[in-house]
Amino acid sequence: MKKIEKFIYGFEKRGLYPDFHTITDNVNEPEVTVDGKKYLMFCSNNYLAMSQNEAVKKAGIAAIEKYGVGPGGSRVISGNIDIIEKLEAELADLTGTEDCLTFPTGYMANVGVIRAMMDALVYNYPHKSEDSVIFSDEYNHGSIVDGCKLSKATKVIFNHDDLTDLEQKLKENRLPNKLIITEGVFSLDGEIIKILDYIELAKKYKAKLMVDDAHGIGVLGEHGGGVADLFDCGDQIDIVMGCMDKAFGGTGGYLCGNKVLIKYLRIACRSSILSSAIPAMMAGAMVESAKQIRQGQELRKTLFDNARYLKNTLSGLGFKMLGRDEIPSLALYVGKEDKGIKFAKILWEEKVFCPIIRWPAVPAGQTRFRIIVMTNHTKAHLDRFAEACKKAGKTLGMIQ
Ligand code: PMP
């Protein structure tokens, strides 16, 4: 215990221990309540305000009334619940795939699927770890990193979104069972992946392709089906993974793909067979979220208008904004960690809730703010946020 205490003390002394603020009211709203005071919220992933959407809440309450609060166990033992199957059909449809398997969290989906695709389930069947190789983008989410660690396959990290490097590595690692993993949207870098190029490369080298579209689902595409919808290619991606804690406003993860693959994953993902299902109450709410998302063109337009307005305002103030693409999570570059900590402190004093993103979420030394814009932020909220950044930036000599 002494060693742990010493470690915590060192962290706190250097100002590195994060503040776990307790929100009492208006959770996920543009202004949340902490210690009885209102703070502008710019770090909730509730892009489309589904978390507080009346129809979504009603659907969740109706599902509680009908199904109770818990799933009763793992599906392979306690059985499926019809509302979960309904959600899976909705998600498959939204992403343009054939079938879907849901999980209580996205983390569980990622740690389950990679091992299932790479290692043997029984008697070296259907895959042998020695025959398997994973190609993972260096900036992939930690849940993908953890999933890779659980597998005995060879791991190859390619330079972030660098197709030339990926192709070179595909040439060098010719094992028969190959899996390329990338994200659809890199929210910390302001990027949408050119997924069609990855599909082409995967075909050329007979590799499977998995896309984690946690930040794309609900936000991108005519019907909010994420990158698969935006580029109309769901049927060409082997595994479309996603999360329901962001644009869907709830919690949960999913894997979408063809019928055979999902049938296999139902028995092969240890995080599914050894763990409880997504609660039916959440599934009920998420079915309604999916419906709203499908019809959410106006919501997405407001979301992107808000993001554009704020990005332009912050760039106009002289801040370095990262990212080549237009997405509703903006990345304001800070650089050194201590500067980021001071910046965040000033934002907090200005009643703004937007902590810095540090290692291990980003490479060491690449501290930044991920500013999440929501559809129900008003222009007044966006202006107040920019004012607070201006004050912090001027105090720290980042802008004039
Ligand atoms: N993948 C990505 C890209 C994420 O941002 C996250 C975090 N939400 C996850 C996976 C894990 O999802 P969850 O929070 O549902 O466990």
Image (cartoon, helix red, strand yellow):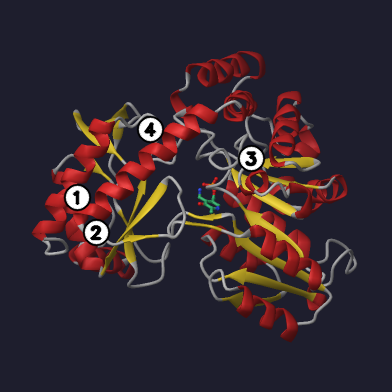
Task: Give the residue at the far bottom of this rendering.
Answer: 172
**Residue 43 in sight:** no
Ligand 1 within 8 angstroms of badge 1 C-beta: no
x and y, in percent, of residue 45 in the image: 44, 41
Residue of label 1: 389
Q: Secondary structure at mark 4?
A: loop
Specify the amino acid type for callout 2. Phe
Sequence-wise, the earlier of marks 1 and 4 is 4
x and y, in percent, of residue 240 in the image: 69, 50
Specify the amino acid type for callout 1. Cys
Q: Give residue 216's mark.
A: none
Q: Secondary structure at mark 1?
A: helix
Residue in front for this viewpoint, 240 or 153: 240
Label 2–label 4 contact, CB within 8 A: no
Label 1–label 2 contact, CB within 8 A: yes
Q: Residues within 10 Å of mark 3 (few under 14, many from 20)?
A: many
Q: CA distance from mark 3 to mark 4?
A: 22 Å
Residue in front for this viewpoint, 98 or 228: 228
Q: Would residue 44 appear left or right of 389 to someone viewing this image?
A: right
Q: Secondary structure at mark 2?
A: loop
Specify the amino acid type for callout 3. Gly
Does residue 381 sit above or below 353 in this rendering? above
Q: Give residue 319's mark.
A: 2
Residue of label 4: 28
Residue in front for this viewpoint, 28 or 20: 28
Q: Would residue 194 appear left or right of 86 to someone viewing this image?
A: left
**Residue 356 in sight:** yes
Ligand 1 within 8 angstroms of badge 3 C-beta: no
x and y, in percent, of residue 272 in the image: 71, 46
Residue of label 3: 225
